[in-house]
Amino acid sequence: MANVEYSKGLEGVIAAESSICKVDGENGKLYYEGYSIEDLVAQCSFEEVTYLLLYGELPNEREYTWFQKHMRASRDISEPIRHMIREFPDDAHPMELLQSVVAYLSGYVEHKIQHSAHCNCRDPLHQVVQLATVVATYERFKTGRSYIEPSKTLSHGANFLYMLTGEEPDELEGSIMDDCLILHAEHGFNASTFTARVVASTISTCYSAISAAIGALFGSLHGGANEKVMQMVDEIGDPAKAPAWVNRALDEKRKVMGMGHRVYKAPDPRATVMESYLHKLSEKNGDFRYYEILKAVERTFRERMEEKGKPIYPNVDFFSGAVYRLLGIPIRLYTPIFAMARASGWLAHVLEQRADNRIYRPKALYVGERDKSILPMNERP
Amino acid sequence: MANVEYSKGLEGVIAAESSICKVDGENGKLYYEGYSIEDLVAQCSFEEVTYLLLYGELPNEREYTWFQKHMRASRDISEPIRHMIREFPDDAHPMELLQSVVAYLSGYVEHKIQHSAHCNCRDPLHQVVQLATVVATYERFKTGRSYIEPSKTLSHGANFLYMLTGEEPDELEGSIMDDCLILHAEHGFNASTFTARVVASTISTCYSAISAAIGALFGSLHGGANEKVMQMVDEIGDPAKAPAWVNRALDEKRKVMGMGHRVYKAPDPRATVMESYLHKLSEKNGDFRYYEILKAVERTFRERMEEKGKPIYPNVDFFSGAVYRLLGIPIRLYTPIFAMARASGWLAHVLEQRADNRIYRPKALYVGERDKSILPMNERP
C-alpha cells in the first residue's frame, strides 16, 4: 500500500500532552515533574518521588507523614494472593504472575473511577506498594522459604531487600535499592506507559491499566536488557578478557547489550548514578570484578565506535544488573523490579490521561479483500 | 500548547495496516477476512470463524476436524484457576477476574514466541477457548453451584450455555449463542484491539496481550453498552410506555443506549442479524415483551432524529442484551461474553502485528517545567 503514508509503531507521532517526565536526550538530562533525576536520588526517597509523580508536587512534612504511613500500611498481601504465588507454575516467568496479580487485586478495591488527576489515590496505591511484596514473596516461595511480614519502618527499597532475604539490609544497601527504584520510576512514553494510557482511556480501573502495562514490559523488545548485560558479564568472566570479547562481538555484528540509547545522545544520567552505586558496593565488598569487566567493555566498545565517529555511552541497564547482583538479587527478578519501580510512573500517567481524556482509537489501513464468497467446506482447497 | 497540532486519542491517525477486518460504515457492511458477517453467521460456526481469523482462510474438512478437536480439547481449566475463581471477591467484576486469569494462564504454556502470522497457534488458542469456561464457572460458583466438565461434542456457544446452566441447550438456543460469538469476534481497531497490538509489539506473550485487551474492554467507555440497554428495557417495562420514556430522555438530553454508531452511518449489519435472533427467541418463548419495547424505543428515537434530518439506527448492543436475557444469561456476564468472542479477533491482531512488527512508541508533547530546585521538606508549602 504505497499510496498512503503512515508512521509504523507511531514513531514520531504525538499521542498526548504530558507534564510528568522530560527526557532531554541531547543534554543527557532526565526530569520528573521538572526535578532532575540527580537531585531526586540525592535528596528524596522512592516514597517521596511516588508522591511527586502522583500529585505533581513534592510533599511537605505533614503530607509526607500521611503518605508514607499509608504506603507502608498497604505492604501486606492477602492469603488468596499468596496462594496464587504459591501455585504459580515453576517454569513460568514472574512478570506473568505480576500481571495476573495486579488485575486480581482490582477485585479487592472499590471502583470509584476518579477522573481528576488529583483524586484520592489511596486505593490504586496498593498496587505500587504490593508489587514489591509479590516479587519478594515469589522469590521466597520459589526457593522454599515462607512468607515474611513486611516491615513498617524500612524504606520501600530497604523493605524489599528485607522481605527478599529475611535480613535487614545495611544503610548503604537499603538506600541504593531505594534509589534504583527512583531511577526506574518514570521515563515518558514508551510501549508499557503508552499501554497504561490506552487502557486508562477507556475509563477502566488503575489496576487494569497497570496490569496491562506489565504485560507490555514483559516483552523482549522492552524490559530485560539488564538481564542480558549480566549474562554477558558472566560469559566474559574476567576483565582481561573483555576487550577481545567485545571486539569479536562487534566483528560478528552481535549487539553489545546496555550500550547506547534511542533517545540519549549524551550520557544517560541514570547510568552515571548507577555506576557510582556499583563502585560503592564493589568497594564495600572488596570485589571490583563486575565493575572492572563492565568498564573494560565500555572502554573497548566506545573506542570502536569513536573510530566510526559515533560517540555511544552506557545506558541505565549497563550497570543496574551488577548492582542488583551485589545486592543479592537473582537475575529473574530484574524485570519485575523494573515493574515495581515503574508502577509509580504508570499510575501517574493513568491519572494524567483521565484528567483530560479521549479514548484511543486510531485507524487501520485496510489492505485485505472484500465480498468473498464462502465455498462449501468440501469444496475448499 | 496551541503551537503544536496533534490528534487526541489518535483519532484519524493510521496505526498499522491490517487485512483482518473491514468495517464499511457508509454501506453498513462488516467483513472478516473479506467475508461478510451475514454469510459467516449463516454458514459457519464460531470455531470455523476463529480458524478464519487466525489463518486468514476458511478451513477445509481436514483442517476443520483437526482445529475443532484441538479447540474442544482445551476447554477444561485446572484446579489453580478454579481456585482463583472461587476465591475472587464477591463484589468484584468478572472482567477483572478474566484479565487476571488470562495472564495467569500464560504461566502454563511454553513461550516460544512466534513471529509468523501462520505460526502454530496451538498454545494461544487455549485462552480463546478457556475464557468461556472461566465465565461459565464464575457464574456457577457465584450462585453456589459446582464446576461442570465441559462437553466435547457441543459447539463453542452451545457448550458455554451448557456449562452455565448444566443443561444442554436446544438447537435454536445453541446456534444463536454460537452466532452471537461470531458477531462479536472482530471489529477492526478500537481501544482493546489496539491495546492487544501495542502489547504484542513488545514481543510479549499472546496471553499478556489478550489479558491487557480485556482490561481495556472493561472500561466504561468501551464495553458494557448492552448492559445499559437492558437496564433501560427493565426501567421502561412495557412497550406502551416506551415512546414517552424516549421522548423524555431526549428532551432531557440523556443518551439512549444502543442507538447510533461512531462508524456505521447505514444500519449496523450485526444489529439486523441480532434483531432476527431476538424475534426467533421471542416466538419460541411466546413472549414478545422485550422485542416490542426495543422496537418501540427504536421507532420513537428514529422519528425524533429524522425530524432533525439525522437518520440513526440501532447498533449491535441494542438487541444483544435481550437475546442474552432470553438465553438465561445474567447481565453481569454480557461484557465477559464480549471478551470471550473478541478473543479470537484479538489473537488474530496479535499474530498480524508480530508478522510485520515495529514496537509502538509514540511521542509525548511535554508541557511541564524543567530545572526546578528541590526545597528542603520543612520549607515546602
Image (spheres, coloured by chain):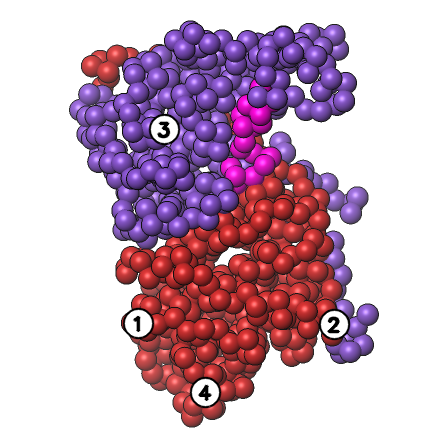
Chain colours: A purple, B red
Residue extent of the magenta highlight: A213-233
Q: How far apart are marks 3 and 2 (CA)?
A: 57 Å
- Does label 2 or label 4 sit earlier along the sequence? 2
CA neighbours of label 4 inside 10 A, class few (<14), some (14 to 19), many (20+): some
Residues A330 and B179: in front is: A330
CA neighbours of label 1 inside 10 A, class few (<14), some (14 to 19), many (20+): few
Q: Where's residue B128, x and y in %?
A: 55, 61
Picture quadrant of residue A44? top left
Q: In which quarter of the image is the C terminus of chain B?
A: top left
> Residue type at mark 1?
Thr
> Residue type at mark 4?
Ser
Q: What residue is disc 4 on?
A: B282
Left or right: B73 as drawn, with respect to B282: right
Q: Distance between the residues labelled 2 and 4?
A: 38 Å
Q: How far apart are marks 1 and 2 (CA)?
A: 41 Å
Is-magenta flag for residue A229?
A: yes
- Does label 4 or label 1 sit earlier along the sequence? 1
Q: Mark 1 lies on which chain?
A: B
- Does label 1 or label 2 sit earlier along the sequence? 2
Residues A188 and B230: in front is: A188
Q: Do the residues at pointers 3 and 2 share their chain?
A: no
Please give the label number shown on residue A53. 3
Labelled pair 4, 1 in contact (Cβ < 8 Å): no
Q: What residue is disc 1 on?
A: B143
Looking at the image, residue A265 lies above or below residue A335: above
Q: Where's residue B231, x and y in %?
A: 35, 70
Q: What residue is disc 2 on?
A: B62
The label nearer to you, 3 versus 2, is 2
Left or right: A355 as drawn, with respect to B169: left
> Residue type at mark 2?
Arg
> Residue type at mark 3?
Leu
